[in-house]
Every structure is written in structure tokens, then in C-alpha cells.
Amino acid sequence: MPLMQPRFDVVIAGAGPGGATCAWYLARAGLRVALLDRHTFPRDKVCGDAICSRAQMHLSRMGVLQEIMANDEGHPAAIGGMVSPGGVVAIGDSSGHIASSPVIAIRRIDMDHRIVVAAQTAGATLLERFDVADATLDRTAGTWTVLSAAGATVQGRVLVAADGANSRLARRLGVVDGPAEAVCSRAYIAAPSTSFGCDGVAFYRRDLLPGYCALFRESREELNFCLYIIPGGGAGTGDLRAMHESVLRDDPFVSRAVGPRAEIGAMKGAPLRLGGIQRSYADHLIVLGDAAGQIDPLTGEGIQYAMDAAEIAAETLQSLLPPGRLTEADLSVYHARWYRAFGRDFAWSARIAALCARHPGLLDTGARALRDHGAPLLGQWAEVMTGARPKTHFLRPAIVMPMLQSLLRHTFRLRGEPPAGPSQEPDATAILRRAA
């Protein structure tokens, strides 16, 4: 008697950008896809909301980016930069030196919902309020049975674990080991309550390195303040709330950029799994997005990497599902492909993060170079930091030489520049505000 075929080819646990994008690619190719999420949409998600260029590409393919911009839900960044640990402010407009905006600020409550709708339109079946409690693989039938906390079941030939950095599912299945090692926070700031004039500025504090905090301008003039605690410095994950509140209150640059009358919303926090796990596959199983640690260890950016990995996963499954080649060895090609695409860059990011934590002066030198050489260098810097170019681009003469020139200029005081610091740059607030 032949075995009964499951209703779905692929069951995806987690309908964030990675899971929902994977569902869209698979459904568009004609595969039967179940997309599970324990929430109902639209739902909020803690994030810096900075959507980088490769994520924009996927959103555009789905028609989602066009909808977002038409409904005034996204704000393209042009004017921005950084404040270094030593208080060097480098702000500029890179829009004339980059083909498109390296970052568009989009609230996750809007973006994630639109991606899910696009996946449904392509043919995926969305099952909301499906809190995955367990999953078992019948190796004889080659079928997963996924069980919800409420007792519902879904069956599929392949299971994709895309349920976030904590990934209870992947940890239960023994593919992901240990808790997430980094954290981030977010608070929205009401539009009329602040005069911050830039689109996006990263603030690097010595006590936060290799982490950082940032302000991003959202649509309708709302601001997003986010803070990342990354391993390797003095701050630990348990310091998130205290650091978030003290930076907003006491940092000489952040507090003045936000302004004294800012209406700051409640802080929310979230875990981050960085740098990629060692094995993101098993028999009939793929791990994707934050669950697989597909987050840059230098920037905390994960959305575009989750979406890139989603496309890679979908292409892999399209080729392997018809012949039924779904063993661990077969699916290892997925891991190899995403590692070639961006995993090596994560290794460079980890090295740079560790170097900046040990030698904060490197960021001071970088900020001086950006300030001295202006928008062309700022554009290249932005492309590297947003993943449009690999981190090894920092080693190219186009970036190294301006940094060396600025280092020499500072060292020998060729311009009579005083030592950098908040008290020596009284116009810092004006720089952050007049850019508008």
C-alpha cells in the first residue's frame, strides 16, 4: 500500500522576513507551503528598522517595496554618518554617490505584514496562532509532523525552522545549541517632539563597544532609537535596559540630538544570534534567518541575510524535493551556499568588531577620514556597513589611504585641530541638526 503524501511540501515555522520570503519563493515555484506563526498579523517586532539594499531587492521582487513607498511607510536615508568614541562627528549626504539609498527605514509591523500577504498571494497557506510545541520526523515516510501548543498538527516533507534567535524548535531538534549571545533594544520617539535632522547616525561609545546605538528617521518623521550589545566588550546582555536608558539620558551626543522634550516610547528588547551556526541543516530540515545566526557580528543587521538565505533555501528545495533527495548530506548544499554568499563576510565582521573593541581609536580615525574627505568616502563606508560591499573593502586603498591621511593630519596637528571630545566640539548638536 503506497504511503500517503503529506498536504504540504514544506512547513515553515516562523513568518518573519526570512520565513515569509522563503514561503514566497517556494509558493511562486508551485510548491505547497505552510507558513506558521504564533502571532497574528500585523504584529510588532523589535528591530532597528534599517532595511538595507539586498533586502530592498527582495521586497521589490515581491512588489512589497512599491506598496510600502506608495503608502508612506518607508523613509530612504541620505543624510547621516557616525559619532566616534572620541566624539568625532562625521555627517554627510551620500545620496549623490550611491546608486540607491543604502537604507530605507521601515517599521517591522508594516513590512512583515506585507511580506506575509505577498506569500499568501503567491499561494502559501498562513496558519496564525500556531505556537510550535514539537516536531517529529517519520524517517520511513519522510514526513514531518509539527504539533502546536493547542494540539493542532501540520505535516510536510521538509521543515524550515525560522522561528527567531531563541529558536525553541531548532534547539529542541538539537541543531542550535545554547542561548543567543547578543541583545538589542528599541524605542520609538514621537515625530513632533524632537528636532533631530539626520536620516541615520550611529553612535559609538567606549563602554558599549563593539556594540553601538543609533537613531534612524522613519516615515512620517518618527524616530527609532536602537542599541546593540555585542559580545567582546564591557557591557553584557544583562546591562541592556540600564545602557538604553542612560545613553538616552546622559550621552552628550544622543541626548542633545534627541532633544530635551522628546516623547520616548517604551523600551523593548530582543535577542540576537550572531555570525552563523555551524550546521544549519539536518535530514529534511533547514534552519533559516535569526535561528541560524544569520546576523552580522559587527552591525547586528540580519534582515537582508535572512532574505538572501531564504532565496537560497527555496532554490535548494526546488531542486531536491522532486527527486526526494532530502538527507542531511543533500541539504548541506544550502549551508555551503549561504556561507559562500555572506558567511565569510561575517568572519571579517567578527574580526573588525574585536579590533574596534580593543582599539577604539580606529573609529576616531575613520570618523576623521569621513569628515575630511566627505560624501564620496561616506558613500563607500555606508555600502560596506550595510552589506552592499564586503568588509574586505575596508582594506582597499580607496578607504585605507584617506584614513592614513587623516591619522597623520591629526597626529601632527597640520590643521591645528584640538583633541576630539564632546567638550571640544560644542557644535556637535548643530551638526546633527543642521544636516536637514
Image: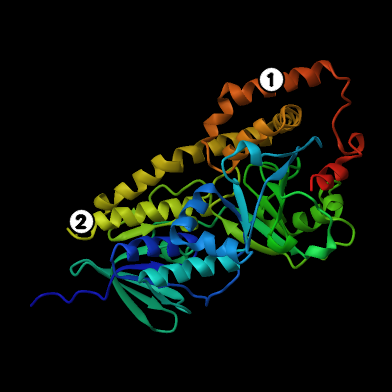
**Can residue 292 be seen?**
no
Q: Is residue 331 above or below residue 134?
A: above
Query: Which residue is located at x 89 percent, y 26 percent?
Result: 418
First along the sequence among labels 1 and 2: 2
Q: Judging from the image, what secondary structure is the residue with disc 2 in?
A: loop
Circle 1 sits in a helix, a strand or a loop, which is it? helix
Asked if residue 177 lies left or right of residue 300, the reply is left
Q: Decide: marks 1, 2 in contact (CB < 8 A)?
A: no
Residue 325: mark: 2
Task: Residue at 37% x, 63% y: name it.
Answer: 160
All told, the count of numbered labels is 2
- Residue 1 percent across, percent down from the top left: 7, 78
Residue 344 picture quarter: top left
Amino acid type for the residue under numbered disc 2 = Arg
* Relative depth, front residue between 57 and 266: 57
**Residue 49 coordinates in the image, percent (x, y):** 62, 57
* Dot 1 crowding, Cα within 10 Å, few <14, some 14–19, many 20+: some
Can residue 313 be seen here? The reply is: yes
Question: What distance separates the C-alpha of mark 1 from that of mark 2?
Answer: 53 Å
- Residue position marked by numbered label 1 in the rendering: 404
Q: Position of residue 248 (x, y in %)?
A: 81, 55
